[in-house]
Amino acid sequence: MNFFEQQARARRTSSRLVILFALAVAGIVLAVDLAVLVFFGAHWGVLGFTTLATLAVIGLGSLYRMASLRGGGDAVALQFGGVPVPEDTSDRNLRRLRNVVEEIAIASGVPVPKLYVLEDETAINAFAAGYSPSDAAIAVTRGALDRLNRDELQGVIAHEFSHVLNGDMRLSIRLIGVLFGILMISLIGRKILWLGGGRSRNGAAIMVAALVALAVGSIGLLFGRMIKASVSRTRERLADASAVQFTRQTSGLAGALKKIAGLPAGARLNDRADAEEASHMLFGDGVGLSGLFATHPPLLERIQALEPSFRADQLEHLRAQWMVAPPSGLEEDVRLGFDSQAGGLPARDARINITPPMVAAQVANPEPGDYLRADAIARSLPAPLRALAQSRETVVPLLIGLLLDADDTIRTRQATEASARLGHVVADAAMALQRGELAGLHPMLRLPLAAIAFPVLRRRPRPELESILDTVHAMVHCDGRVSLFEYCMARLLEVQLRESLDPRRHARFGRRKPDSLREEFATLLAVVAQAGNPDDRAEAQRAYLAGLQRVLPRDHLPYAPPADGVLALDDVWPALDGLEPLAKQMMVEAVTAAASHDGRISVAEAELLRTICAVLHCPLPPMLEHG
């Protein structure tokens, strides 16, 4: 199943969640009304009041919990006890985690998520949280870092990246908010029992009401667990399959599952209240529910899906072995001698053979070789630039430097805009970087470098981020001659920062149809065609028509490159990003056809295609060629 089908499925699941929530609320309201009938008789005024009060409690509870999670992935990770992983950490386990996450982020074409460790948890577990890849956070337990070797850690992280890419995270956060409302009646009853009924003559009645609330609340708990199980189990199986496809082997993910099954701590978390609320988000079952309420398939079933010949008695043997000598991930790394098999980057003037369906199939769906390519890219990043990307003091000049134009006149104007908003120190440093370390940077390293820098940038104060966004906007619009890549790079940075500042506002699945966006499609394709063929109008027109036939085969919109060039895209991004998932697949194929109407594209054009897709939330792997 490709990315666009996964997105469509996630949208349907989101709709099903609304229906299940409505049924759960109806069940709770009926139970409350039944209790009122038993104790007070058929008084319609009392029944109406209790119905409205019950709905208000559930609705306000859900709204309160959702508001508490409006900060996205960071908010969830911190609320569940996560400790941020420093970019410059010297802890070997944390450094290994960061390396694995950066490589997978590069391979999947998304920003590096914020990393957290649940330091007090000795179990092996992890979760991904956030409304979109731009505000994603991944948290792993200390037990996972200590017990898993690099292959196993890679399998777990790849599993979590599947949730990042396929829209599962936003469903998970919404599920936490929705289920909190369902459980509010039970929480109120528990609170009343804890406080006691007091010595008033109504104390007995209050205690009875609390017991009734607990009984009714158990219905909410029942519904909540059923909803989580129905939403989560299938997504976990798909995430396992995606992790295997991504990492090229089954042994890593299977090894992590075996250690969960074979070690005493397993995947169960210490704080049962938090584990219950987040159970549907976890890599492994952190609560111990089974049967109808299980949020994950049985461990043995998950292992056998990866290794069909694995038997239950082998699991018993591993348990006995690890009781005597618990595994150490770092020691296993040494024994296994993990070495990179990565190759090099293609030449700057290389030409890549691609087809539109091939590119669309790669969106958020990295193939086995993409991880090795990502490792090659990560190793090719110059150490000084990586250090700049991981420092709070230098990350802003670095990103501003990436946006500076090669043309002296435009670059000077851009630097003036940056100096006016961020100060001359930042602007001068960016100019120095653009003339120095960034001057010879391979085109394929620009987006990965920005991906590594992004989580560091997110830690800057909100007012400073607003100033950076203002600067980016001014740099793009200071001259209509800005190149398409620089424009898209700036737009991508702006989109990611906007989403990280207000993640909940941008968490939605598109619903628009292609037929309603004819002019927007035509504008995007005309800009791409003109950028690829700036001196040959006839060739640009052929490229435009090649793309148009992919998305609007029955329309005859003439080729008309916008007078303001690339800046015309400002008006089309929001509409195109609002396309329904399968329509976005058509769009990706159309843009690919326009960029490669002769069947081949340059490395620079491939990076442009990746940037456009990233702006529209369709991330591509680092290299498009396969062979």
Image (tube, rainbow, N blue to C red):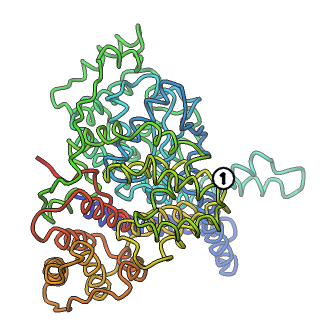
Please name the residue that numbered disc 1 is placed on. 187
- Quarter of the image where one finds residue 610: bottom left
Residue at horizontal 41%, vertical 69%? 487
Q: Which of 484 and 186 is in front in this view?
A: 484
Neighbor class of circle 1 (other Cα within 10 Å; few <14, some 14-19, many 20+) is some
Residue at horizontal 43%, vertical 27%? 266
Give the left or right position of residue 157, taking residue 302 as reference.
right
Residue at horizontal 83%, vertical 54%? 203
Where residue 440 sits: x, y (%)? 36, 49
Q: Which amino acid does label 1 sit on?
A: Leu
Where residue 158 sits: x, y (%)? 34, 42
Q: From this view, report whether residue 145 is shown above or below residue 301.
A: above
Whether residue 216 is visible, yes or no, is no
Question: Which residue appears farthest toward the front when viewing the image?
Answer: 408
Whether residue 132 is visible, yes or no, is yes
- Quarter of the image where one finds residue 263: top left
- Quarter of the image where one finds residue 355: bottom left
Q: Nearer the viewer, residue 327 or 609?
A: 609
Q: In which quarter of the image is the N terminus?
A: bottom left
Q: Nearer the viewer, residue 142 or 121?
A: 142
Where residue 547 sits: x, y (%)? 18, 77
Where residue 280 sits: x, y (%)? 44, 48
Give the left or right position of residue 178, taking residue 43 as reference.
left
Q: Is mark 1 on a helix, strand or loop?
A: helix
